[in-house]
Image (tube, rainbow, N blue to C red):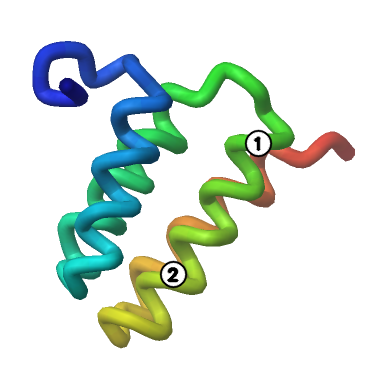
Amino acid sequence: AYTLDPQCIAALYEARQLYAAAGDHTSALDLLETEASVEPDAERRVSLLSELARGKARELGDVNGAIMALRSALALLPG
């Protein structure tokens, strides 16, 4: 469903849960990144980007990707 409507947050969430359960962390994190990019609520987007950073570091060993996600999250915080 998310391929038909990449703005559908519920479909993105469900698809990434399925990928994560199957052990396909790369696909799950790709969908998490997409979900964060379309999430309208800034506070929720910060949470998703923080989760993305943890996943990139822990599951993929992608420290640079984790840092980029955290920087994106910090840019959304007030002040």
From the viewer's perspective, is 46 left or right of 43? Answer: left
Task: Say which amino acid is labelled 2.
Answer: Ala
Amino acid at dot 1: Arg
| Relative to 21, residue 58 above or below | below
Residue 44's disc number: 1
From the viewer's perspective, is 43 left or right of 47? right
Mark 1, other Cα within 10 Å: few <14 / some 14–19 / many ≥20: few
The secondary element bearing badge 2 is classed as: helix
Res. 2 image quadrant: top left
Q: Quadrant of the N terminus?
A: top left
- Which image quadrant: the C terminus? top right
Residue at 45%, 59% (x, y): give it. 52
Residue at coordinates 17% horizontally, 56% vertically from top-left?
27
Q: Quadrant of residue 37?
A: top left
Q: Secondary structure at mark 1?
A: helix
- Res 66 label: 2
- In the image, residue 28 sits, relative to residue 10, either above or below, namely below
The image shows residue 35 at horizontal and vertical percentages of: 39, 34
Up-down: is 10 above or below 60?
above
